[in-house]
Amino acid sequence: MSVEPTEIPTTVPAAATRSGPPRWLRPIGVRLVFLLVVFAVVDVVFAQVNSLAVKNPVTGLLAGLATAAIALVGYARLVGWLEQRKVPEVGTATLRPQLARGVGLGIVLFAGTILLIFICDGYRVRGWGSVGDAIATFGLMAGVATCEELLFRGVLFRIVEEWAGTLVALVVSGLLFGVMHLLNPGGTGWGALSIAVEAGLMLGAAYVATRSLWLPIGLHLGWNFAESGIFGSTVSGSNGTVGGLLDGASHGPAIISGGAFGPEASILAVLIGGATAILLLRKARKAGRIVRAPWR
């Protein structure tokens, strides 16, 4: 997978313009908390909207795409104003190639994961789902992937990296991403840890490798859509998905199948996601995109 050269976003300048943020919002800690609160609220509100709209394929698709677009525009304008800079991480120049590459890669990675689980007798197909469910699920996951990536990679990872470097940002954002999934009905400690490694690290590495949010958004969307919209599996212990083309079910030991949490709690998913993260970080290191902690 090739990586386009992208500038690392600059930090907040010492002096803001007249239209810039008030002085009290400029410190990195205040800025981080402010943006986390804003986008956490956006995530919760849009999740509720999408969970209602997903009952119909048309409204589910339209609501998911609309909430994703609104969140992206809001991020670009708010961050651009607050940090007094251009916002290349959501720039349109790399939108199509990186988003398409991410979606395709996410689908391939999950398809490979579920194939391995199937070979180990950890996944079974109970029957067919429906095209309508798959369309609604795609819309739902478009909204989910976009809002979560803006929150965890666009805000949390990026600002922690600015303060403490890439390694700390990967650990902090990955762990908190996993902890968030404990709130799902089927959330477990192992499931949260699995998500932290296979998704938190992989998606953070995708951002580091490209310095763009399009690849992690696409990866997140492609993985989640394949998981529920194609193979009909439970996503991260959630009961809010509507299904997909197949009606699938976990079978056998949870360490292989993922159990009630879904395939993401399978050790096979952890290995595949972790390996992908390592490959992306190697690309990032070769491109000089790993940020050291300022004190080093």
Image (spheres, helix red, strand yellow):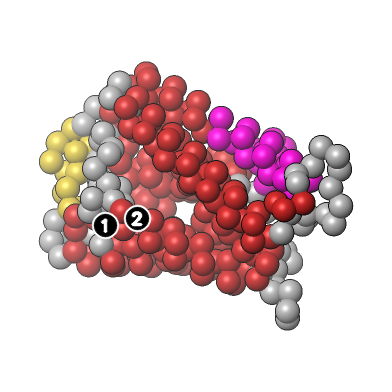
Assign a secondary structure to mark 1. loop
Q: Amino acid at mark 1?
A: Gly
**Relative to the observer, which residue lies in front, 214 or 185?**
185
User: What residue appears at the point 50 percent right and 26 percent down from the top-left corner?
Assistant: 66
Question: Where does residue 194 sit, x and y in percent of width and height?
Answer: 35, 64
CB of mark 1 within 8 Å of CB of mark 2? yes
* Residue 284 visible in this rendered orientation of the protein: no
Query: Which quadrant would residue 269 be assigned to in this image?
Result: bottom left
Q: Main secondary structure of the magenta part?
A: helix
Residue at the far top: name it.
58
Question: Is 14 positioned to the left or the right of 1 in the image?
Answer: right
Magenta segment range?
69-96
Q: Amino acid at mark 2?
A: His
Note whether 163 is above or below 132 in the view shown.
Answer: below
Question: Where does residue 26 sit, x and y in percent of width and height?
Answer: 73, 54
Q: Is residue 188 magenta?
A: no
Residue at the far bottom: name it.
296
The residues tagged by marks 1 and 2 sit, at their Cα atoms, a distance apart of 6 Å
User: What residue appears at the point 55 percent right and 44 percent down from the top-left corner?
Assistant: 38
Question: Is 43 positioned to the left or the right of 129 in the image?
Answer: right
Pointer 1: what residue? 187
* Residue 32 visible in this rendered orientation of the protein: yes
Pointer 2: what residue? 181
User: What residue appears at the point 37 percent right and 20 percent down from the top-left corner?
Assistant: 59
Question: Where does residue 71 sit, x and y in percent of width and height?
Answer: 55, 35
Assign a secondary structure to mark 2. helix
